[in-house]
Image: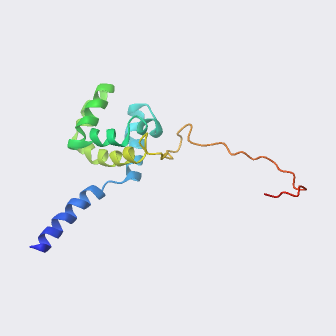
Amino acid sequence: MKRLIVMVVVLLLTSSVMADVNKGKRYYMKNFKQKFKMDGLEFVQLHTQDEWTLLFENEGRGFIIEFSKKYPKYESYLSNPKTWKKLQHVRDFAIEYASDSGNIPSCGDDKGVEKPIDLETKDSSSANFF
């Protein structure tokens, strides 16, 4: 009996662990970036972590409804059950880099992610090296 309970718990945990932030980023960049006309940083910053979590409950119903309204052309694509497999990973990507997470995704060509390096030259003959 204990073995059965352990197996059920493991199965429940692995179903949530199977989604992957990096896969989500790749799926977003490949499948959704062109459709939504926004880079990964703009996308993830649309909501907080709690908001993203709520949107992706019930197999992504909230996400599908919100983005189908914004992009009616892609409603059938978003509602397709095969898309849900990708959306599970996109969910983890969105939550990981949400507006309140403090994390910034490196989505290749995202604008505004790179910070300029300040290379101030110092006089090497100075007694203060530090």
Residue 13 in which image quadrant: bottom left
Q: For the C terminus, give its image quadrant.
A: bottom right
Residue at 38% across / 39% down in the picture?
48
- 81, 67: nearer the viewer: 67
State the scheme by which the image is colored.
rainbow
Residue at position x 17%, y 69% in the image: 6
The quadrant holding residue 128 is bottom right
- All told, the count of numbered labels is 0
Outermost residue, right side = 125
Tell whether 8 sits left or right of 69: left
Residue 15 vertical position relative to residue 108 in the rendered view, above or below: below
Q: Residue furthest left?
A: 1
Q: Residue at x 59, y 43 (%)?
A: 114
Q: Horizontal and vertical percent for residue 14?
A: 25, 61
Q: Quadrant of the N terminus?
A: bottom left
Residue at (26% x, 44% y) in the render? 84
Place of residue 104 in the rendered image (x, y in percent of width and height, measured from the top left): 49, 45
Q: Which one is nearer the viewer's eye here, 96 or 61?
A: 96
> Between residues 55 and 50, which one lies in front from this camera angle?
50
In the shown orientation, is residue 95 left or right of residue 68? right
Left or right side of 72 for 120: right
Can you give x and y, in whole percent of width and height, for residue 117 in the image?
68, 46
List the single residue furthest toward the front. Answer: 128
Within the image, what quadrant is residue 94 found in?
A: top left
Q: In the picture provided, is 46 more to the left or to the right than 79? A: right
